[in-house]
Amino acid sequence: MRKSGVSRRSFLMSGAGLALGAAAGGCRTAGSGGAGKRIAVFTCDVTPPLGTPIYSSYKPLEKIETPLLAKGIILEQGGRRFVLCAVDYCELCNESHTLFRQKLADAAGTDIDYVAVQTVHQHTAPMADISANRLLEGLPHPPAFPATSTITGAADRLAAAAAKAAGALTPFNQVGTGQGKVERVASNRRVRLEDGSIGVRYSSCKDPKLTEAPEGLIDPFVKTITFAQDGKPIARLHYYATHPQSFYGDPRASWDFAGMARQALEEREGVFQAYFTGCSGDITAGKYNPGTPESRQGLCDRLLKGMEASVAATQYEKAGDIGWATLPLLLKTREDKGFTAAECRAEMENEQGSVLARNGAAMGLAWHERAGEPLVLSALHLGGVSVLNIPGEAMIAFQLYAQQAAAARFVAVAAYGDCAMGYICLKSAFAEGGYEPTATNVVPESEDALKAAISALLAAAPQGV
């Protein structure tokens, strides 16, 4: 498989802080001129077979409550094609993420650098890491994990759907933007307690001292981008920041409340809808979700109401030329106690350890072993609209930073690209404590690197638009 970005400039975390790699370049940018803009949409069922060890319990999948979907668009102008895709998986990591991007690139007839694949991040869906699988397959008694064939099979089905769509491109001449406020869904997971420590408000929470605490720092708006031809919408892309799960741990496959809202809107409008999860590393629905079926339906209803408000607020403009920027990013791996390669290997090989811990350790070791291979960030620029596609479980501050850095533009952020590093935290979180710093494989200075990369991608947008 082709790997992108290795020979181009990278944002590299050195021991002393942020440094630029020595390779020539910067953002790789591609512009498409000419009037012939076209779009195609695709949807593919990527649900694993019954019996597949399913995240987060890794118990054999018993029930498909709803199919897991991959939904995306292909844009074309001036002979170039660009792909945005959201997958109802918890995570795609390392080789799995590259595989999905490469398969889509081949199917759409484009370069891998022009393909962005993000996961929606439901926890009733696969955790897919072929690189970790390879390590587990070498053990005499490995824990349960989803077979590599289930991951490659899903990628093949997705490629077939995208290839079919690429043969049915249709013109578009307008891009619409809107946003709507979402009430009583998102809340910050990090709750400051009376003693100054950080309480953890997980996606399902029944602790009154946590549920009664304020929402905290969130982005309350869902943003919607609509592609249309002469006022008739063809596809809508929605961007909202929260962990999109109301329950987890049992052997069900489900697109959960975010997928419920997405599907309901598609059925009501008869228009293709895709949903992307923003920077939700520290954002959950825990304040409003005690884990009951009724609370899940309430989360769906309130998210749907915000999406409908965003659609109602949509204003159309003539579609500008399509621009795309790609940037490789190297983040320094943690080597402090509990995060070394040797400790990851020992935990992975510990046959007395839990299935979840052993799989997590294999993913941590896979991250160590990919040292020197950058992550890939990208941005779609279309007139005054920018879509940032970034890796990992980034905290909400990165999304707000992006919006502030380009306040004159309509900026939508999709996180959960390659999730091999886990969380991307603010430096302050390491000092404060809480959950997120315990679940990241990269150093605190990654904040500087990611913000610099975001700034570079936004700087590649057309000026004066």
Image: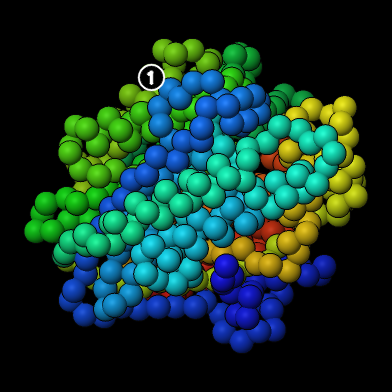
**Left or right: 241 as drawn, with respect to 175:** right
**Few, some or many C-alpha atoms within 10 Å of disc 1 (few <14, some 14-19, many ≥20)?**
some
**The disc labelled 1 sits on which kind of residue?**
Gly
Q: Quadrant of the N terminus?
A: bottom right
Tell me what residue is drawn at x 69 percent, y 27 percent: 199
**Left or right: 161 as drawn, with respect to 189:** left
**Left or right: 12 as drawn, with respect to 171:** right
Q: Closer to the camera, 140 or 355? A: 140
Asked where in the image residue 15 lies, by quadrant, the reply is bottom right
Tell me what residue is drawn at x 75 percent, y 30 percent: 355
Q: Can I make out residue 408 in this image?
A: no
Give how far across and how far down residue 412 sits, in percent.
40, 54
Asked where in the image residue 84 lies, by quadrant, the reply is bottom left
| Residue behind mark 1 | 298
Q: Closer to the camera, 221 or 352? A: 352
**Left or right: 1 as drawn, with respect to 239:** right
Tell me what residue is drawn at x 56 percent, y 60 percent: 98
Disc 1 secondary structure class: helix
Give how far across and how far down residue 268 sits, in percent.
19, 32
Asked where in the image residue 362 lies, by quadrant, the reply is top right
Task: Using the image, determine if residue 92 lies above or below residue 404.
Answer: above
Q: Residue furthest left?
A: 230
Q: Quadrant of the C terminus?
A: bottom left
Tell me what residue is drawn at x 76 percent, y 43 percent: 136
Give how far across and how far down residue 261 sits, in percent.
33, 31
